[in-house]
Every structure is written in structure tokens, then in C-alpha cells.
Image (cartoon, rainbow, N blue to C red):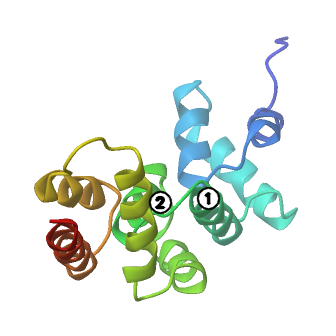
Amino acid sequence: MTDRPSPYARAVALLGRRAHFRAELRAKLLGRGYADDEVEGALDRLERDRYLDDGRTARELVAAKLARGPIGRRRLAAELARKGAPAEAAAAALDDLVPDDDREAARRAAESWLGRRRGRPDPAALARHLERRGFSPGAIWGEVERLGSLAEGAE
């Protein structure tokens, strides 16, 4: 007889540490040597018991990322995909929590970035920063143009 916990118990322990997507839990349990049919049964039970909900997990992840500061829709979508969020759960979370127009968030991100710079800021560096944060090309271009007009006004 073994003292190894069931896949359900192991998954509950993992969920006790942080929310997971079904795909994440599946990979972790399979990686620990549990059989595929046992893992699927455990995951189905977790969903029935409402411990596992990909839609809720996607919304929580997006909300947590947005609470840390402005971030673009593209970066959030990439994070959700990397963690294994199903496409429909990711799309619903983004539609519910992230405005289609990201210009205001890009402006806040640019202002924060500019506040940490000394000397004359480089528009290309600002564009790279905003691109890494996942903002749309239109929002990035708007902030680069605004930086140019701010620089012209300071001269």
C-alpha cells in the first residue's frame, strides 16, 4: 500500500496554493505519474465541486495583472495562453475586464515610464516599453507622438 495522495487530493492541494487552469493541473498531475484516466476523473470532479473553473481563473488572473499597473490586451492574452487558459475563457475575461480602447492605459504606462527617466527620453525606447506591456500599435504611436509634442513644448 502506498501513501501517495489521490490525484484529486493532490490537485486540491495545488489549488490551495493558487488558482490553476484545468490544462495546468492536468500537466502537473500527469508529470507526477498519475494515469490519464485518474487525472481526468479528478479534474471532472473538481469542476463539479466548483474548485476548478477556467473562466473564473482567467478573470482573476486578468484582474490581478491590471491591479499591478497598466497592461495591454495583447500581453494579457499571451499570459492567459501561456498558463493554459482555454480560448473562450480568455476571450470572455478580456472582454469583461479590458477596454477595447487601450489609449488611456497606455498613457498611464507612458507617464509612469517617463517619470522614472532622467534627461531627454528616447521615443523608440518608450515605444519598446509600451510594446512589451502589450499595448496596441495605435496607442503606442499616440504616446510616441505625445512625447514628441511634449519635447517640442519644452524647447
Q: Nearer the viewer, residue 150 or 144?
A: 150
The foreground one among 1 and 25 is: 25
Seen in the picture, residue 24 relative to 78 is either above or below; the reply is above
Q: Residue at x 21, y 82 (%)?
A: 138
Relative vertical location of residue 122 with respect to residue 60 in this rendering, above or below: above
Q: Which residue is mark 2?
A: 80
**At numbered mark 1, what does the secondary structure look like: helix, strand or loop?**
helix
Q: Nearer the viewer, residue 37 or 97?
A: 97
- Between 142 and 146, the residue placed more toward the observer is 146
Is 109 left, or right, of 128 in this rendering? Answer: right
* Rendered-image quadrant of the C terminus: bottom left
Identify which amino acid the numbered label 1 is placed on: Leu
In this picture, residue 93 sits left or right of residue 19 = left
Residue under the image location 19 percent in, 54 percent down: 128
**What whole-number distance in Å separates the C-alpha atoms at marks 1 and 2?**
8 Å
| Residue 88 appears in the picture as rendered | yes
The correct choice, above or below, for 8 with respect to 112 in the image is: above
- Disc number placed over residue 61 in the picture, else none: 1
Quadrant of image for the N terminus: top right
Identify the amino acid type marked 2: Leu
**Res 17 quadrant in image:** top right
Q: How many numbered discs?
A: 2
Is residue 102 visible in this depiction of the protein? Answer: no
Task: For mark 2, give the secondary structure.
Answer: helix
